[in-house]
Image: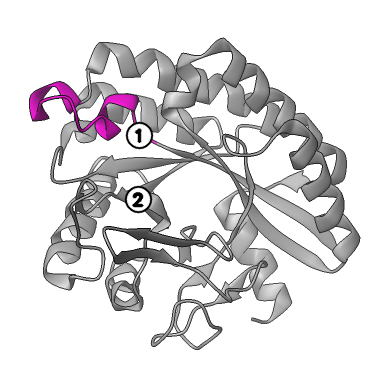
Amino acid sequence: MSLNYVFTIDGDWDEYFATKLSEEDRKPVKDRLIPLIEGEIAMAASTGGKFIHFVHTSPLVRDFFLQPEFLALWKKAEGAGGEVGVHCHEEELYKAWHYADTERMAPAIKDMAEGLKKAGLTPRSYRGGYMTFSPKVLPLLESHGIFLDYSCDPGRHMVKNGEIVSDWRGAPSNVYRMDYRDHRKTGDSKVFEIPLGVYIEQQSLFSVWQTCRRLKAAGGTIIVSVLAHTYDFTSWKMRLKIKTALMICKMYGSFINSGQALEKIKEMDL
């Protein structure tokens, strides 16, 4: 019986979401992002170095985060106990969403997963941009040895321009084995879902405390994720909030990495 958190950081930057900017101005700037990612690694020291940086890929940028300067940071994170994962924003922002289109998702996942592996890294996790997910993606993840997904935000129902972008209504709030037909149900795929437990940006610290107390009181073995973003690290107030939220989480449970999560899942016989 234990409460376990996986600290995750989506590698997104502010300008990506600013549709009023030109496409060129929405692209990431290396010199701005490197210090923020270094801040992530420093912050993760409070969790024993255990965190996942989900490496962004999208139609706006593909291999930008596979440049040598970033690969050095991913290796530094792994060396300190952290990990990298695949984070697909497969969309034309707020206009078209392609997360269920396997012809687009297959190369996006493949290129990022293989690019990281060629650099000697070990991506074992996936999260869709905006928490998007389709069961059609499950075979793609399995084929690349990615057996942990972190896209689930239980109850989430995001609709843009009349189109469902992300739907996690009815999904379990604890780790489960995903179904090939419906990602919100338990099934017999090889991919396990670790749902979102604490969303630091969207919750107050009081809400984080309440969430941790509720999760602890539920009993049993619980595995959930804690979410922040790279852009959060631009603000000293958000850095302080993240640090405090992690401290609150540790009052009630422990931070684990993907290997430990898989071991606990095996013990749970899911």
**Residue labelled with disc 2:** 129
Please provide percent x and percent y for residue 61. Answer: 15, 37
Q: Secondary structure at mark 2?
A: helix
Q: Secondary structure at mark 1?
A: loop
166 w.r.t. 140: above or below: above
> Is residue 12 on the magenta stretch?
yes
Please provide percent x and percent y for residue 52. Answer: 49, 42
Please provide percent x and percent y for residue 3. Answer: 79, 55
Picture residue at 35% right of the left edge, 50% below the top: 129
- Residue 159 falls in image quadrant: bottom left
Picture residue at 17% right of the left edge, 32% below the top: 64
Type of amino acid at the residue the image marks with label 1: Asp
| Nearest the eye: 121 or 147 | 147
- Is there CB contact under 8 Å for labels 2 and 1? yes
Extent of the magenta region: 11-27
Q: For the C terminus, which image quadrant?
A: bottom right
Q: For the N terminus, which image quadrant?
A: bottom right
**Which circle's residue, 2 or 1, is located before the other in the chain?**
1
> Is residue 206 on the magenta stretch?
no
**Residue labelled with disc 1:** 12
9 w.r.t. 103: above or below: above
- In the rendered structure, the answer to whether residue 52 lies left or right of residue 95 reads right
Type of amino acid at the residue the image marks with label 2: Gly
Please say whether residue 123 is visible from this viewpoint.
no
